Image (cartoon, rainbow, N blue to C red):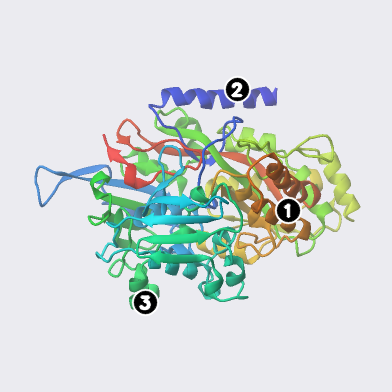
Amino acid sequence: MRKLGLILLALLVTCSFAFAGGASETQAVAVTAAPVTTQTTATDTSASTTTDVPEESHIGIVTGTVSQSEDDPLMKAVTFTIANGAEPESLDPSQIQGVPEHRIFEALFEGLVAVDPQTADGVPGVAESWDVSDDGLTYTFHLREDAVWSDGVPITADDVVYSWLRELAPETASPYAWFPAMFIAGATEYNAGEVGPEAVQIRAVDDHTFEMTLIGPLPYVIGALCHYSFGIVPQHAIEKYGQAWTQPENFVGNGPFVLTEHVPQDRIVCEKNPLYWDAENVALDEVVFLASDDTATNYNMYVSGEVDWNTSIDLNNFDQISMRTDYQVAPQLSTYYYTINVTEPPFDDPLVRKAVSYAIDREELVYSVTRAGQIPCWGIVPEMAGYEPLEESDIGGSLYDPDYARELLAQAGYPNGIGFPTVSILYNTDDAHRQIAEFIQQQLKDNLNINVELENQEWATYLANRNAGNFQIARAGWVGDYQDPNTFLDMFITGAGMNGGKYSNPEYDALINQAARMPAGEERMATLKAAEDILINQDQAIIPLYFYVSQNMIDTNKWGGWYPNTMDYHPVKNIYLK
């Protein structure tokens, strides 16, 4: 009956698309088992919301505003306000790693490749076109001659070379440097400090021609280039202002908007960039990103009209929210999981890690806690074209078996949990993450007699500790950076920036590296599936819980240019007041 209920819930959510006035999307779940086929680019979903902001700090912001222009009283100035979630770690693309930061990045910067708002595929950005060599290894990009920085300085291929080398430089300590290193020949060695920057296979052919050589014929590279780790930054501003270059008074960008105000823990204000190459197609005059980790406050601001796009959902009001026509829910290429520090007792024993995984009733979690059509999962990779989700292999495909979990824990030396130390689950401040952690806490107590303490931290602190491995168990979420299983798997190779659990298996690394050099096809997919089997069924390095659906609140009868897509990408460049 429970499975029937989940199916009916998924059908209800799917049917809601037809009555939602158009697009449908949301924050932290994935509601369909249908194959996902769009190419995409994104990042860590760990901050559905974050950052403590008093509700009263937002008083005075007018959203969805249409005001008279000072230059032309007949022209209307439009402000679009977003409850963005986390206070960003940084505005420097080399120092960010979260979804809230990604939304801001898309407003302030543009890479060689931009995002199609409907499909999330890669489309021309600063590069107006590109060519690919016959062997699929070398890409030549042709930059727009009318692309300039917001201070009027022309953007050249040398800016791209500078930006990518800066991202990869060991001294930059970028949390996402591992990502471009998985694509560009020589980049891994440079990032590791083994060779100099001249070994990285990128070059400026001339002012408007940029060339890169890949490690293999990677079929997903164009979608990946949308990612902020491939962003282009202003060398002249960085050299002039140093770390202060992202302050509003010093800021130089190349996106559809420019930074005009940043009040930490409160708001970021961006105004339309008149020098952007496609400015005539940017409809908004101002975008305001509000920082708040209080989902109830965000919901109240949305209902009162202070916010135009609410990127988080208040589970305490979910029954009411789910009945609204402006509640947007859609399939999302992303996974909610718990990562484990596999180097420290007691979780250095795979038997213990497996026991914890089998002790969690994922079906009950999505049925009674998250409740938005999420799909319980065993593996980390969602279903997509040519790739089926991983199945459990020890006990015939079951996702939940507390008896087997107790047996495994006993084999590890802790019969009925006797002698097992109290352990901690780390999560970033958010009511939904808290409720999930409380559910897991109770499951481990009831099924394994394990005591669990919960620890919540604000976004930046949580990320720093998770990336450094300062945890036992930590929540995590991942939105695919492109439409390929590799985006969910390469972050667990030895030493990868997102591998905070410090998992290391040479066999796993070899399979991931092998797949990166294989042409597209069934053999490559089988290689990736073998790697995922090692990661989960053999080593249980992480504990996947469910595949997301995206959840947002926005009135698509009022706002155009906001479309559902599997990446939950909605560039503000494309949004307009109807």
**Residue type, label 3:** Glu
The residue indicated by pointer 3 is 239
Badge 1 vs badge 2, beta-carbon distance below 8 Å: no
Quadrant of residue 242 within the rendered picture = bottom left
Residue drawn at 54 percent across, 53 percent down: 44
- Residue 8 - label: 2
* Residue 256 visible: yes
Q: Is tag 3's residue or tag 1's residue first in the polypeptide sequence?
A: 3
Quadrant of residue 499 within the rendered picture = bottom right
Badge 3 vs badge 1, beta-carbon distance below 8 Å: no
Q: Nearer the viewer, residue 546 or 194?
A: 194
Question: Which mark is nearer the camera, 1 or 2?
Answer: 1
Question: Which of the image's four quarters has the N terminus?
Answer: top right
- Residue 511 - label: 1
Against 419, residue 430 (above or below) is above
Q: Farthest residue toward the front?
A: 134
**Residue type, label 2:** Leu
Residue drawn at 32 percent across, 40 percent down: 304
Give neighbour class at mark 1: few <14, some 14-19, many 20+ (Cα, 10 Å). many
Q: Is tag 1's residue or tag 2's residue first in the polypeptide sequence?
A: 2
SS under mark 2: helix
Question: Which mark is nearer the camera, 3 or 2?
Answer: 3
On the rendered structure, is 491 left or right of 303?
A: right
On the rendered structure, is 119 left or right of 73?
A: right
The residues tagged by marks 3 and 1 sit, at their Cα atoms, a distance apart of: 41 Å
Question: Which of the image's four quarters has the C terminus?
Answer: top left
Image coords of residue 320 (percent x, y): 46, 31
